[in-house]
Image (cartoon, rainbow, N blue to C red):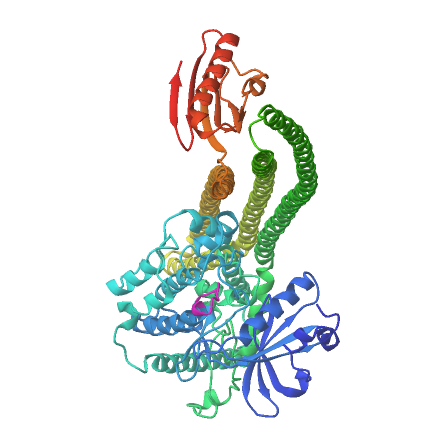
Amino acid sequence: MPSSTRKGAQKDPKLADLFFKDDPEEVFCDLHEIGHGSFGAVYFARNSYSNEVVAIKKMSYNGKQTTEKWQDIIKEVKFLEQLRHPNTIEYKGCYLKDNTAWLVMEYCLGSASDLLEVHKKPLQEVEIAAITHGALLGLAYLHSHNMIHRDVKAGNILLTEPGQVKLADFGSASIASPANSFVGTPYWMAPEVILAMDEGQYEGKVDIWSLGITCIELAERKPPLFNMNAMSALYHIAQNDSPTLQSNESDPFRSFVDYCLLKIPQDRPSSGELLRHDFVRRERPPRVLMELIQRTKDAVRDLDNLQYRKMKKILYQEKHNGPMGESHEEEEESERASCKMNSLGSNHSIPSTSISTGSQSSSVNSMQEVLDESCSDLTMMHRDCDSEPESSAHSKKVNPRPARKECRGRLWLVGREIQVTKQIHEHEQENELREQMSGYKRMRRQHQKQLIALENKLKAEMDEHRLKLQKEVETQANNAYIELEKLAKRHAVHCDKEMKTTSADEKKFQQQILAQQKKELTTFLDNQKKQYKLCKEKIKEEMNEDQHTPKKEKQERLSKHKENLQHSQAEEEALLLSQQRVFYDRNCRGFKRKVMVKRHEFEQEQIREELNKKKTQKEMEHAMLIRHDESTQELEHRQLKTLQKLRMDLIRLQHQTELENQIEYNNRRERELHRKHVLELRQQPKNLKAMELQIKKQFQDTCKVQTKQYKALRHHQMEVTPKSEHKTVLKALKEEQTRKLAILAEQYEQSINEMMASQALRLDEAQEAECQALRQQLQQEMELLNAYQSKIKMQTEAQHDREQQKLEQKVLLRRAHLEQKIEEELASLQKERTERIKHLLERQEREIDTFDMESLRLGFTPVTSVFISIVWTGPPLPCWTSDLLRSGLVLVRPGRLSLATDAHTHINTHQTETHTPERKTHTRTNTHQTKIRTHLKRRHTGASVLVQANGPAFSWGVCH
């Protein structure tokens, strides 16, 4: 809010663009006040540069609620800037001057409420249809842009000279839909606006309700419940059935009004649907509104001429006869005071806090027919000086001022100064009611702001809570990722270390075999030498014994034996080397196969460790998610409880304020009635004195007649009676006259007493009847308030129950989704575990098969792979199982051990390796199966064992 006019506005560039920087007092001239209300005043003005006639609404943002007033001005200016439609008031700009905003708009003739006030009778259906059609076009435009007027009534529907209907007074309008503020004029408010804070938001269909009430206003001269207190009217609208037309109207009109006043907003039609209604689409003369405007001008002109003649007559009488008599003047003063009290007592129209406040004056005046008819100086007329000449000499003496008021303006007025003075006087009289309603609206808006602020605070708290939980989840995920990375690195290091160890063991194993073979070869060669010498000596001995054989032949035989022996030794040596080479290659292949199997075991251990780690991490994550869900659930319940507590506190405060306002209103009505009665009692002696004077005059006239009759009788008696009897006759006549005068005096006193008693009794009875009627009315309004508050309380409790049930359903659904997510993730993890183990085993099996096929291709007997499945039924397997399954040439390596129960243990996929020749595999395996069975039976008496083995060359199974 600016501290000063232009300087303040220029501090914010966005706000500075909303206002013109020129001095409005230089731009506009001929300013004449044409309307007055709580918002300020409306002026007729003329643009000094373009000579254009405009209407200016001056709104001050000084005094109480300065910030709120400034925000309302900003909101209305922004709203008006967006309007571009022939059925909405044209906005021409805004100026700031001395903490006052000058809102400049197009000039219109008057409002639909002014038509009712001028003609003192309802409008015709065809005229109502034309006005309603124009208003619907404007509302359809607003609703299509998600805007809500929120103060539709006859005083805010203006008419232009060509008969164009314009929506005006956007001080209560909402620039967004839906909305939930408590604004508007009470009698025209839709139920959902009254219950906005209790039941939620509303949309543009609130304008449809107000339009239906406006139709009733145009057809019956005032809206429903207008004779009721404004606060009581709010309670009545909120909980009772929709109003209906009371007058005899056509079926399309009645259907249109009932259609607009459907209680449930969802059932209520939109503005577009109403434009297709038969009542709006019915045929009507194209100049119906122009003819209505012309009739209104003629009526105002006639009233103006009548006013002139009455004033001229009054001035003429005062000039020739002097001032009126005291008693007559006092009587007129008494009548005016009584009229004033009656009008104040029935004036319950509480204007809205926005610009629409001023429009209430027309509605108030429409109720004050007695005051308007008795004080006929308040005439209304708009005169177009350029197009319509004056019709009489009397009217030429009047100097009418063109005038226009945006939200209500009495734009047909000729006696402008008198009318503005009357508006100011009414504004002062209604100030208490207006302040009460304004305070109530401020309280409702403040409550709404508190609820919104709390909701925003709770939402921010929930967002912060969720962000904290999200960070915790991300931290957990990052830690899990880091742990898996560390595990992968550790596995890689172990693999490198194992590979190096394996390589060193392989070299060592090869060196041992080579050294052993070298030793065997050396021994073999030494044995060959020894054997060669022995054979050589044996041959020599045999040759020496044979004396018959020639020496040469012996030499040849010896040489041949040497050659054979050498050849045989060479073959044996070659065979030994070949066997050593085969042995070396076979053992190297076997060692490599063992290394491969050991590597496979290591890989299986690694993948099991990794998968177990993932499972543990996933379980920790799930536990954390469950903990988060529980904390979120606790926070949601706590927030809902806080919100509901604040709502109940605000409702209690609202109900307390409503009760205090009702009590204050009741006291004020009783004080007003008491003042009226006191005034009547004060005026009673004057009235009685006048009536006493009248009776006294009657008795005086009677006495004069009797005196004349006495004189005539005395004269007659004097003539017919002798002179000596004159004294006696005169004495008798004198006594008779005295007796009759005494009777007249007694009758006079009796008449006076009877008149005073009857007047006092009549006054007491009337006052008692008024008091009784007022007490009944106030009691009904108090009962209506109690019923309304009880309904609001019940609705709030039902709303709280619905919110609680909704939260419970939300919590259960979220928990079910979380559990489903956990199950899916565990299933996915188990599936991943199974697939990875399966792929690993398949890969390892392919590697083994490839290695065995390569060994077979190289001519080595393949190492047989046997898979044995043992189902052990009995006590849990002891720790010596691994030692038991390792015997002789068969090595059984357990793959996975799972303890199902104490009585059932399953050992699956035991891979056996045998180094026996293929032809002996079946026997050795059977022997091994027998060993397993024997040991298990010996250690666990009464246990049953099922051993199944599958190998490349056999398949067998034994059940014990």
Q: Is residue 251 visible?
A: yes
> In the image shown, does 105 or 774 lie closer to the viewer?
105
Measured as percent of width and height from the top left, residue 16 is found at 68, 77
Which of the 4 image quarters holds residue 305? bottom left
Kindly identify the residue that appears in the image at 42 percent across and 54 percent down. 225
> In the image shown, does 15 or 108 lie closer to the viewer?
15
Kindly identify the residue that appears in the image at 51 percent across and 58 percent down. 179
Horizontal relation, residue 784 to residue 530: left or right: left
> In the image shown, does 137 or 131 lie closer to the viewer?
137
Q: Which residues are magenta?
A: 143-153
Horizontal relation, residue 575 to residue 726: left or right: right
Which of the 4 image quarters holds residue 211? bottom left
Kindly identify the residue that appears in the image at 44 percent across and 81 percent down. 160
Say which quadrant the C terminus sits in.
top left
> In the image shown, does 33 or 902 lie closer to the viewer?
902
Measured as percent of width and height from the top left, residue 63 is found at 70, 64
Secondary structure character of the magenta stretch overall: loop
Measured as percent of width and height from the top left, residue 350 is found at 53, 58
Measured as percent of width and height from the top left, residue 108 is found at 48, 80
